[in-house]
Image (cartoon, rainbow, N blue to C red):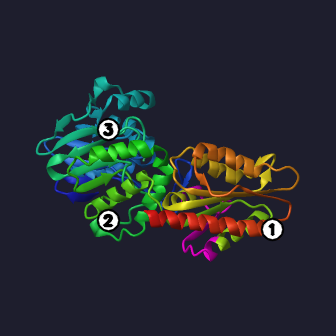
Amino acid sequence: MITIKENLHYVGVNDRVKHRFEGLWFLPEGVSYNAYLIVDEKVALIDTVDVGFCPELLDNIRAVIGDRPIDYIVVNHVEPDHSGSLALLRQFYPNVRVVGNKKTFDMLSGYYGITPETGLCVAEGDTLKLGSRTLTFHLAPMLHWPETMVTHVADEGILFSGDAFGCFGALNGAVVDRDMDCTRFWPEMERYYAAILGKFGAPVRTALKKLGGLDIRMICPTHGPVWADQAARAIDTYRRMASGTTEEGLVICYGSMYGHTQRVAEAVAQGAAEAGLKRIIVHNLSVTQPSFVLADIYRYGALAIGGPTYNGGIFPVVEDLLKRLAGREVKGRKMGCFGGFTWTPAAVKVIDEYNAKMGLDMVAPGIEWKQKAGDDTLGQARALGHALAQAVMANATQQ
Ligand code: FEO
């Protein structure tokens, strides 16, 4: 338990065991599930934690309020990393009232059998007075699920934001940004956005517009640090990522079985460097975890993707990236592609088909070669790198 400010306590936990968040996204430094306890004339718990950490959450709560009961549990987001402890908590606190909106209860009834009759169903702008503090609820659909809402304490400018403004990375001792070195959290915020919220650019922009009308001096998200001194930077990071603004740089993503596609990827990188581009990132998709690749793609304005033909399609790790990109809002990038084959070509065709959904601006036709990537192919790859560099540098100049 850590006190954030008077009668507002952090009661969340660290998960340093899970390898992959949502079973998908690599967690090299763990993740925190944040929950907050407001102690007033009424006691309110804002969000819970993954069910596996319920005993620790209970200990943290009891360290603050002892045997005093909790009056309300506010569910800003039903995803089980935050609602997972609800059913057990209701056994310890049988009279607690769960607070959520209509969509919240649609989900809670299915997951835990919790219906609005036993709780408090709120709508946009509704308030709940706890004593000296009053909570105001604002719906923020698709930030990250349809039921998502945020909870605001207007007098103090505190926003309990759910997943928004959260990031990967466990909390090492301190909870509030001013009490720690936050350097490692900023790239983890971008990786979190790219992995978890990347599909929902338009709803994020809508939510940011709505939140722009609130006094926000402290952000208490469900993952990562509490943003106080750096709340504005957290909001700006989300605004930038949701807007599609990119930096000058090229991300080259490839899969390779026997090294030929890798040689072509290297030639693309060399061509871009010869053209004067300084920021060039190369990811072997058989090695780098997808969330790191996505975070770089979100950051930079040019992208090259390549892979060999495989079983009449494209090499699986490359198709995995293409699927993830097609399901996200990644717009306005300059694009190039390349792919080899041994007897019947397919890779470039598959990339082109995915790009029909992604809608990126191909700066040149895909490079295709049979068997060994010879000098002609490598020359084309350097030319592609050159074209991508020029395109992204021209874009940066226009911006
Ligand atoms: Fe941290 Fe969408 O759950």
Residue 361 higher or lower than 185, as above or below: above
Residue 227 higher or lower than 386, as above or below: above
Rendered location of residue 320, percent (x, y) = 65, 49
Q: How many discs appear?
A: 3
Which residue is disc 2 drawn over? 174
Which residue is disc 3 drawn over? 92
* Eye-nearest disc, 3 or 2: 2
* Eye-nearest disc, 3 or 1: 1
At label 2, which amino acid type do we have?
Answer: Ala
Kindly identify the residue that appears in the image at 63 percent across and 47 percent down.
355
Toward the left, the furthest residue is 132
At label 1, which amino acid type do we have?
Answer: Asp
User: 241 or 91: which is nearer to us?
Assistant: 241
Q: Quadrant of the N terminus?
A: bottom left
Q: Quick check: can you spot residue 246?
A: yes
At label 3, which amino acid type do we have?
Answer: Phe
Mark sitting earlier along the chain (3/2): 3
Rendered location of residue 362, percent (x, y) = 63, 54
Query: Label 3 vs label 1: CA separation?
Result: 71 Å
Asked if the beta carbon under badge 1 is closer than 8 A to the nearest atom of ligand 1, the reply is: no
